[in-house]
Image (cartoon, rainbow, N blue to C red):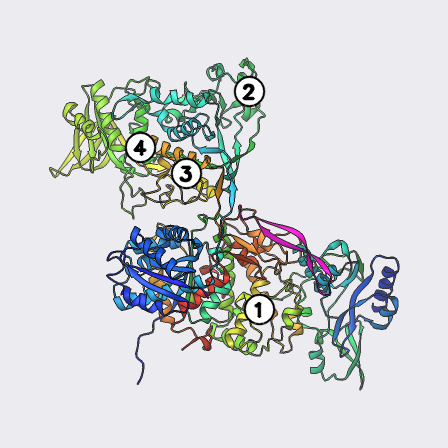
Amino acid sequence: MQRIGVFICHCGTNIAATVDVKAVAEALGREPGVVFSTDYQYMCSESGQTLMRDAIREHKLTGVVVCSCSPRMHETTFRKAAEKEGLNPYMVEIANIREQVSWIHKDVAEATEKAIILGRAAIAKVHLNKPLKAGESPVTKRALVIGGGIAGIQTALDIAEAGFEVDIVEKEPTIGGKMAQIDKTFPTLDCAACILTPKMVDVAQNEKIKIFSYSEVESVKGFVGNFKVAIRKKARYVDEEKCTGCGICTEKCPQKKVPNEFNMGLDTRRAIYIPFAQAVPKVATIDANYCTMMKTGKCGVCQKLCGAGAIDYKQQDTIVEREYGAIVAATGFNPMKPTQYNELGYATCEDVVTSLELERLMNAAGPTAGTLLRPSDKKHPHTIVFVQCVGSRCDAENEKGKPYCSKICCMYTAKHAMLIREKYPDTEVYVFYIDVRTPGKNFDEFYRRAVEQYGVHYVKGQVGKVVEENGVLKVQASDLLSGEQLHIDADLVVLATAVEPDKSARSIATMLTASMDTNDFFTEAHAKLRPVESPTAGIFLSGVCQGPKDIPETVSQASAAAAKVIGLLAKDKLTCNPCVAESDEMLCNGCSSCEKVCPYGAITYTDKEFRGPNRTTLIRRVASVNPAVCQGCGACTVACPSGAMDLKGFSNRQIMAEVDAICKM
Amino acid sequence: MQDVKEFRPKIVAFCCNWCSYAGADLAGSSRLAYPADVKIIRVPCSCRVNPLFILRAFQRGADGVIMAGCHPGDCHYTSGNYFARRRMTLLFSMLDYLGIERERTRVEWISAAEGAKFSKTMNEFAATVAALGENKRLEDLRCKK
Amino acid sequence: MQEMMKKRATELLADGTCDRVLGWAVGDFVYDQTPALFRTEEELQKGFVYNGFSAANLSKYLVKECRAGGKIAVFLKPCDTYSFNQLMAEHRIKREMIYVIGIACDGKADVEKLKEQGIDGITDIKESGDSYVVSTIYGDKTVKKAEVLAERCVACKSRKHMVYDELIGEEGEVIADSGRFDMVEKLEAMTPDERYLFWRGELSRCIRCNACRNVCPACTCEQCIFDNPRSGVSQKAAANSFEENMFHIIRAFHVAGRCTDCGECSRVCPENIPLHLLNRKFIKDVNTFYGDYQAGEDPAAKPPLGRYEKNDIEPGEAGGVKA
């Protein structure tokens, strides 16, 4: 029989206001095996833990039940405290009487009764608990970063700096991501390329970093410290080793009419291309959808011209298998395509553009070589209207948009307005906003400069309609402060569209078994305290894939993720979860049912000799679980018909004891 | 004297640690109430829920059993809920085949972010089970008062 | 047929292909045959029988025999070969130790049905075209096979052997429209209350003799959870309706996706409970929800509960009932 101590936490008034903690302590004190039962104001506090430790010592406790907040909050706290007193940490169970009782029930009698029942269930479980010892597993000292934008770049550089190998997998032909497309950065107005491209070069030159460009993650197996990842290197029809990036092919390719995605489709590129001058790796890629040779078998200009002999029309996708200890998701974002907003005219008017398109229109390396000309007639626009929150901050019922604030639009719009007024003082600039949000170092100062110094017209209100009439964009809007309807004849309308997680993120999250929120942003392990870790061990989050953020924030988060990765890779061994499956060889049929449902390949079979009747021996095939590989899901335990497979810490008997205690009233 | 006390069902909710239990925590911290009749048992994954546990609950006096796990595709262990889904589909179909009220068992996928869904699901399920009344068809009289 | 089989068994023993033959012998009654091992020609001549009462599925006994070593020849009817394959898939038997003699089968007689026809005091049965000639202490009687075939043979799913080393008799075909799910469908069409009453009427007769489990070729656990006091669910005899339900639900669930529908459970049930209707429900559900699958057809196939599809039906939508 266990000697169980029960501790009821008041959690200040969080629990004690709704649950009669004294009554719970008294009722649970009468349960079989309970030798000590008390209540205390804050069990998780230093003195609460001391109370528990004293009781373990004085009453020779073999098991502990803490009735408190969720085990997801303080289970580890109490287990550690017990361990310090020499009690196996897995002899501690938590009854969740805060989230599951006091916070959701109002009636004291009802809440108290439920708290007692949950306490009894925990006691029933502890009666069957066994001391568990954690195993160890080795750590592969290499990290994978998925996504080569500024987030992935910074994370990779920081990890490499600490001396660990890093691979970057980037689905585009070059790293650089969205930042490479941006013209200037707020609030300093320095050029994005000037600060990004040196980092890209650093990545290319760093011996510890390997770039898999034009590649995608195909599958992920394994677990923290021991991931096995298959990377698909998509055929680019150019031998990366041979290509020198001289660019002759990209100048001579006769297929000139390919929309240039780097310039947001505002101009065209060739079928063989290097996305931009500072691309890393600087290697050409053939766009098979447009290449005449690939489509008709006739052309071959690039092959003839290539002095390095790098063109290979027969190149195939290849799969590379690599092992990693940690994986960082840095899959980034895309600005939403506002085509569904018919009233804003994006789909119908050429001169209604998105902010990222405007970046390209203002960039010296863009389609207009940095002179702001509107797309339709290549004339200089004199009146420009900015529309904020397109697709952001929408009602939950509004299927067109996102419920969240995209966070960066207020600042980049202020930047755009300021740059335009600086360069073209004869231009009138209007910004229609819901709120102007400028928290951040030097951000509000920046915005005020746009208004006060540069005379940008900020109007609180929404744009209702944009229609084109004879080359003029008729903008209809409301000014909420004056209550007036405004009619503006604009030459260019710029939509600050919502930030959307990259489409690839969902499938990557599935492969990583990392959870996502309803907007397809990766979920962090804890919103406040573990913001760069995914709840799945060994998976870390960097950049906008976790939520909208600007460049400084992205870089800080990227470095934070790197710090977490380094902390993991610095370990030689990881302590495993001891709550793993275990097979009872005497009961095992060796039927392989369990193996088929194990997602980790943790189960193997051996032929083992057993004693048969009458001093005979017999060989039986039996399962054994590798505790370093098993993650403790328990799928095998239900697949097993004979009950040979059981899960430590969540055994059949334990769960049934909880069921019994809950149902007994 | 006739006992006119309102029928309060006993409901056992098996919740996976990573999504649905966290969803219950969120329901709690958001103060989204659901009946006290619902009592949660934490399991690592929905695939840990053995049909034996569900029958056991009915035997010991439960009037309804619900299993909640991560949304398909979001399982912390990749595939656990997919296997759980097949098992429960077959089990529930069998219970129904035996004439045992299908509404007494339920599976729901509730993420860690869906505190509201957790609360709503439990409210609905408790109401459904309360309307069905006491579990008679899978009861074990020895386990009743 | 019986003589051909005996002759072949004798040869296999003689040429060293096997050291024993697993076949059938007469038990307490002529119609109550029992699986038996034969090691010599003499034993074969004395005890080996094969006729309309040789119903037992011999595949399960190979689990034990494989552990005893040596080489075993076994006679398997088409339905038994499914079980054989399933046992192979689950590594319960060793193919290299077994010599499979497939034997053609066009059904076995149900002694209860014979008795219903007024045939009693049976001493022997012989096949004669589409009839049985039943010898009794009151003289020979002839009945149409179709009238006295066991239910599982009326709804036979396959006369084709899934595996064999040699074949005696003519190979048949898989029967797609066996009608074996007709009764399941009939039950599904009932109201829940009617179904409940039907199954209470059946399962309440269970005396927990464990015959269904002991004969089932899918129930080869080293120790059944119901016999294991440490499992927490052991029960020797069903104390009440719950335990009756519990035993049969869990047994059906444990063999779900593994049951070859050989029908042995119902054949041996002394209370004539149609236990195969539980297993067939799962087979039908698996077919409906996850695509056609018959355990034992292909030993390399992944079982339905050992695989999944991302868009599998949800438990709440499983409209297997009144679809």
Residue A561, position in %: x, y? 38, 35
Label 2 with label 1: CB-CB less than 8 Å: no
Image quarter where the N terminus of chain C lies is bottom right
Please name the amino acid that badge 4 sits on: Glu
Q: Residue A311: which numbered mark, if any?
A: 2
Label 4 vs 3, first from the N-terminus: 3
Please name the amino acid that badge 3 sits on: Phe
What chain does badge 1 belong to? C
According to the picture, the residue beneath numbered tag 1 turns out to be C226
Residue B101 visible, this orientation: no
Secondary element at tag 1: helix
According to the picture, the residue beneath numbered tag 4 turns out to be A553
Our reading of the magenta stretch's main secondary structure is: strand
Quadrant hosting residue A190? top left
Q: Residue at x 23, y 22 (%)?
A: A420
| Measured Cα–Cα span from mark 2 to mark 1 | 69 Å
Please name the amino acid that badge 2 sits on: Ile
What chain does badge 2 belong to? A
Please name the amino acid that badge 1 sits on: Phe
